[in-house]
Amino acid sequence: ACPVNAITTGNNTFRFLRDLATPNKLVITQMAPAVRVAIGEAFGLEPGTNVENKISSALRQIGVDYVFDTTWAADLTIMEEAAELQERIEKYYSGDKSVRLPILTSCCPAWVKFIEQNYADMLDVPSSAKSPMQMFATVAKDIWAKEKGLERDQVTLVSIMPCIAKKYEASRAEFSRDLNYDVDYVITTSELMTLFKDSNIDLSQIEDSPIDSVLGDYTGGGIIFGRTGGVIEAATRTLYENMTGKKLEKVEFESLRGWDGLRVAEVKVNDLTLRIGIAYGLREAGKLLDKIRNKEEFFHAIEIMACPYGCVGGGGQPKAKKRLETLQQRAEGLNSIDRSLDLRVSKDNPKVRAIYDNHLDHPLSHKAHELLHTEYFVKVKRGKDENTDASKEE
Ligand code: SF4
């Protein structure tokens, strides 16, 4: 069940297979954080088991040329979002009337479409940072491909996502140039699972093979994007260190965690107590936005994800019998990866720093705005069923 009844919901498996079979066609993939802790369920593994290196191996086996990871771009998204939040806070408290708080995370296309359709007077509040999927795609086609001497249309970029709404996001016109889309098409976790089974690939048995790290490894901040509260926790880790100039002694912000559909937390940064809202399910998001619009509540930042427990519960993920228990296990799987990493704050990612040094100067620079930011448009609802709440449907 897609939270937005996404416009482009077609299954692209056949197209993927055709591209893989086409001689001299360069096919690259990116994979979202939540995919790796869910797909193993279809092969008898426990929910939450991290099979990223098995997915990588299986993708190579079916002919993918480069297997990349969206999670690296989640760290890049955090660099931009944390800088944007800091800039807005500083302007807001200096009396600059051109900015509004809260800032709203913008990596969920279902939620972006929801606000475009229902809160046209609030389109200046979402972060303008592109989602990790779209940031990855821009970097891959406009920087990585160029460095390899390739034109954009010589690279076919396939995104493996837990999400049906990502098909809609990839098809938005602003994410294309000269009729070449940054993301060529999206395959969901469930579609990939079927493709592997049809190809007689048993993910539980296949040897590991590491993801290509040309574009970089990820930090713990990037991997927790896949669960509720993860985007804002990752942003808070980087924001805290940027604003205080100190290293965090404890990177886990327990106050931002939990399973309720609507949560409020406070985080102290220097003399400022940040008030943060976290919601999943568009019904809860609507309640939160109404309160903000009516000035009943004030927040500095808000994370909204359309699906239950965030992307781990996305409409493109395998269906689970014990649903909530399974979603929690998937989320804990991401937390466990985070805990296992040496680098857990996005700003410490060396490859992310390198891309700023070599191509983008610094977060929010002119070049970063050109490549990594987007804008939002008023949209008209076309059917009474649009904006269906994912948590109700699933
Ligand atoms: Fe997609 Fe759901 Fe994640 Fe939003 S919360 S990005 S709709 S999977």
Image (tube, rainbow, N blue to C red):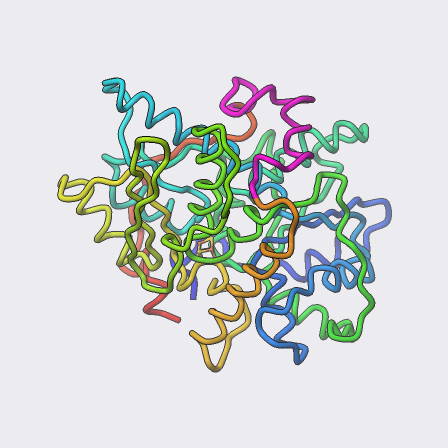
Q: Which of the 4 image quadrants contains residue 59?
A: bottom right
Figure disc tally: 0
At a point 29% along the width and 45% down the height, the residue shown is 117
Horizontal side of residue 184 vs 55, given as left or right: left
Instruction: Name the quadrant of the C terminus.
Output: bottom left
Residue numbers of the magenta segment? 345-369
Q: Position of residue 231 (x, y in %)?
A: 46, 47
Q: Position of residue 96 (x, y in %)?
A: 26, 18
Instruction: Name the quadrant of the N terminus.
Output: bottom left
Along the viewing direction, whichever of 28 and 205 lies nearer the viewer: 205
At a point 55% along the width and 71% down the height, the residue shown is 318
Looking at the picture, does residue 385 appear above or below residue 352? Answer: below
At a point 80% along the width and 45% down the height, the residue shown is 25
Q: Residue furthest right?
A: 23
Q: Residue furthest front?
A: 249
Q: Which of the 4 image quadrants contains residue 355?
A: top right
Horizontal side of residue 115 vs 346, given as left or right: left
Looking at the picture, does residue 10 appear above or below residue 320? Answer: above
Q: Position of residue 305 (x, y in %)?
A: 39, 53
Magenta stretch encompasses residue 5: no
Looking at the picture, does residue 202 appear above or below residue 314? Answer: below
Along the viewing direction, whichever of 338 and 12 lies nearer the viewer: 338
At a point 32% along the width and 64% down the height, the residue shown is 260
Q: Position of residue 76 (x, y in %)?
A: 57, 36
Along the viewing direction, whichever of 169 and 324 lies nearer the viewer: 324
Looking at the picture, does residue 312 appear above or below residue 374? Answer: below
Magenta stretch encompasses residue 354: yes
State whether the magenta stretch is mostly helix, strand or loop: helix
